[in-house]
Image (tube, rainbow, N blue to C red):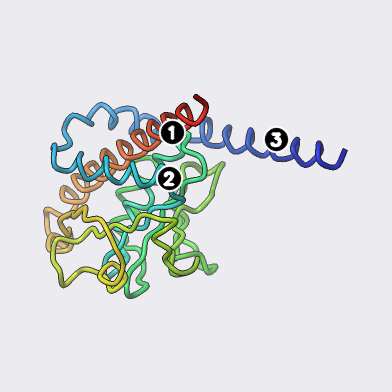
């Protein structure tokens, strides 16, 4: 009886989690995602090759970790969009983290551009990572900013480590010391406090959203293939 109750509790929790994923997106965020997935064809062949390789690994692992020397802009946007992709496509049991050599605050422009995309972003002074809660809706305020620095050590047997910097001087010590994949994004910092800042962050956000939603879809597809193979 206890065993049956335990299984039922797990099933109910799974149903609740699925409902949270499928039905609690902000309407603006859901619209942004639906528009963005139409842009998969804009991803270059070279970057699709890297993303496909990431998906192959991630299908068999637990998490993806985005790494740069500082952890305040690109890495956080990648973490948020990768986790959103997992929610959007129902990729269960996969998690996204970000890490850097230093723990810095979220750049305000990042929170602003994510808010415009439809995320629920609020500044907190209660010990939340980087001072912000960023989630898919106000009704489901699960913070997607969970730094791997706070979670534990990097185990590449369980996760995919991704260096997102072009410049070797920007690469984190973690990425340099562990096996990693390279998926570089241009740093937006040179355009901050200039007339091009907003435009630069909008373009970066669109690129990251497109590629992370593609990553989630490919991961889901590969997981389904592996499941079908195991059942044959």
Labels 3 and 2 touching (C-beta < 8 A): no
Q: Relative to the observer, which residue lies in front, 57 or 121?
A: 57
Instruction: Find numbered disc 1 in the image and state the secondary structure of the residue it sits on.
Output: helix
Q: Earlier in the sequence, mark 3 or mark 2?
A: 3
Q: In the rendered view, does 185 fall on the left or right side of 128? A: left
Tell which circle, 1 or 3, labels the residue nearer the N-terminal end: 3
- Residue beneath label 2, please? 60
What residue is rendered at 37% in x and 46% in y?
82
- What whole-number distance in Å separates the C-alpha atoms at marks 3 and 2? 25 Å
**Image quadrant where residue 76 sits:** bottom left
Query: Which disc, if any, is residue 12?
Result: 3
Residue at point 31%, 64% (across, down): 72
Question: Would residue 130 be found to the left or right of residue 125 on screen?
Answer: left
Give the mark nearer the N terminus: 2 vs 1: 2
| 128 relative to 216 in the view: left or right | right
Residue positioned 41% across, 42% down in the render: 59
Residue 95 percent across, percent down from the top left: 46, 50
Which secondary structure, mark 3?
helix
**For residue 226, which numbered disc appears in the image?**
1
Q: Quadrant of residue 69?
A: bottom left
At which x and y percent is residue 34? 34, 28
| Circle 2/circle 1 CB separation < 8 Å | yes
Position above or below: 13 against 192: above
Q: Position of residue 209 (x, y in %)?
A: 29, 41
Say what secondary structure mark 2 lies in. Answer: loop
Q: CA distance from mark 2 to mark 1?
A: 9 Å
Q: In front: 135, or 172?
A: 172
**Mark 2 Cα within 10 Å, few/some/many (few <14, many 20+)?**
some
């Amino acid at each position: 009886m206890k065993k049956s109750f335990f299984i039922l509790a797990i099933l109910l929790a799974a149903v609740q989690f699925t409902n949270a994923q499928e039905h609690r997106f902000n309407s603006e965020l859901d619209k942004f995602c639906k528009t963005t997935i139409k842009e998969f064809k804009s991803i270059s062949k070279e970057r699709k090759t890297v993303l496909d390789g990431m998906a192959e690994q991630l299908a068999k692992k637990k998490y993806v970790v985005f790494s740069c020397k500082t952890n305040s802009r690109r890495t956080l946007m990648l973490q948020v969009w990768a986790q959103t992709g997992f929610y959007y496509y129902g990729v269960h049991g996969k998690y996204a983290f970000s890490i850097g050599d230093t723990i810095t605050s979220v750049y305000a422009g990042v929170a602003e551009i994510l808010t415009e995309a439809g995320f629920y972003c609020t500044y907190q002074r209660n010990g939340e990572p980087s001072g912000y809660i960023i989630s898919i809706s106000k009704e489901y305020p699960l913070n997607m900013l969970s730094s791997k620095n706070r979670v534990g050590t990097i185990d590449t047997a369980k996760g995919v480590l991704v260096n997102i910097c072009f410049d070797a001087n920007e690469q984190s010590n973690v990425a340099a010391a562990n096996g990693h994949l390279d998926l570089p994004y241009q740093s937006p910092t040179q355009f901050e406090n200039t007339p091009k800042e907003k435009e630069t962050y909008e373009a970066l956000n669109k690129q990251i959203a497109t590629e992370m939603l593609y990553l989630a879809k490919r991961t889901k597809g590969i997981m389904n293939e592996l499941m079908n193979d195991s059942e044959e």
